[in-house]
């Protein structure tokens, strides 16, 4: 596996954050949240820095990163797409919506488009069951979605990129 080259300024910022938390292993989740904010994801190299600073095994950091769904070890797209697969969304057609996103973006769940614009994930519940099926893109909620509407929604983001 190829090693990722991290920006020195970002690494310095991460070390400062660890120090601000007194390099306390009890602050691991807070530090990882901050680290993901800096780097956008938590690759092995970032986990190693955190482990070193907190003087804990990398396996402990990795365990936390892989346990909580908020954390990611792969880069996300500029516009992360999350398709709700909760019960209400699922029974109202979320699977067809997900299939259409996969078809149009030419990626599978957990992947990012080669241009880095979109990443695709599923989640359990957005909490907007009355709008089912629901998709969020970069934090914006789209409700009562159908597979037929997916192309137009994606076109909005592609247009933004051209401006």
Image: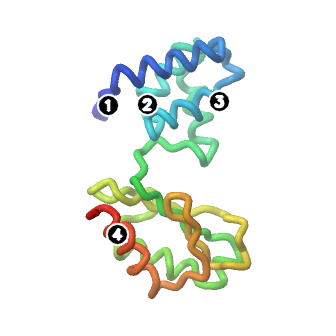
**Tag 1 or tag 3, which sits nearer the N-term?**
1
Q: Residue at x 51, y 36 (%)?
A: 36
**Tag 1 or tag 4, which sits nearer the N-term?**
1
Q: Residue at x 65, y 77 (%)?
A: 89
The residue carrying pointer 1 sits among few (fewer than 14), some (14 to 19) or many (20 or more) residues within 10 Å by Cα, namely: few
- Of 53 and 137, nearer the camera is 137
**Tag 1 or tag 2, which sits nearer the N-term?**
1
Q: Which residue is mark 3?
A: 30
- Look at discs 3 and 1 and give the one toward the viewer: 3
When the figure is inspected, residue 71 is found, relative to residue 127, above or below; the finding is above
Q: Which residue is mark 1?
A: 4
When the figure is inspected, residue 117 is found, relative to residue 19, above or below; the finding is below
- Helix, strand or loop at disc 2? helix
Residue found at the very far front of the displayed protein: 163
- Of 6 and 57, nearer the camera is 6
- Look at discs 2 and 3 and give the one toward the viewer: 3
Q: Which residue is mark 2?
A: 44
Whole-number angstrom distance, CA of label 2 to CA of label 1? 8 Å
- Helix, strand or loop at disc 4? helix
Q: Which residue is mark 4?
A: 105
**Tag 3 or tag 2, which sits nearer the N-term?**
3
- Helix, strand or loop at disc 1? loop
Tell me whether the residue at label 4 lies in contact with that at label 1, contact meaning CB atoms closer than 8 angstroms. no
**Tag 4 or tag 3, which sits nearer the N-term?**
3
- Look at discs 2 and 4 and give the one toward the viewer: 4
Whole-number angstrom distance, CA of label 3 to CA of label 4? 33 Å
When the figure is inspected, residue 67 is found, relative to residue 104, above or below; the finding is above
Q: Residue at x 32, y 68 (%)?
A: 158
């Amino acid at each position: 596996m190829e090693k990722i080259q991290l920006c020195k300024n970002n690494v310095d910022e991460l070390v400062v954050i660890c120090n601000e938390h007194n390099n306390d292993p009890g602050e691991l989740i807070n530090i990882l949240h901050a680290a993901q904010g800096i780097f956008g994801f938590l690759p092995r190299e970032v986990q190693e820095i955190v482990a070193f600073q907190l003087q804990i095994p990398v396996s402990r950091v990795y365990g936390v990163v892989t346990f909580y769904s908020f954390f990611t070890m792969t880069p996300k797209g500029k516009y992360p797409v999350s398709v709700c697969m909760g019960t209400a969304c699922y029974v109202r057609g979320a699977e067809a919506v997900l299939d259409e996103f996969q078809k149009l973006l030419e990626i599978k769940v957990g992947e990012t488009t080669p241009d880095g614009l979109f990443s695709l994930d599923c989640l359990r519940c957005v909490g907007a069951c009355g709008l089912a099926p629901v998709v969020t893109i970069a934090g914006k909620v789209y409700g009562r979605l159908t597979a037929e509407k997916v192309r137009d929604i994606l076109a909005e983001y592609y247009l933004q990129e051209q401006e």
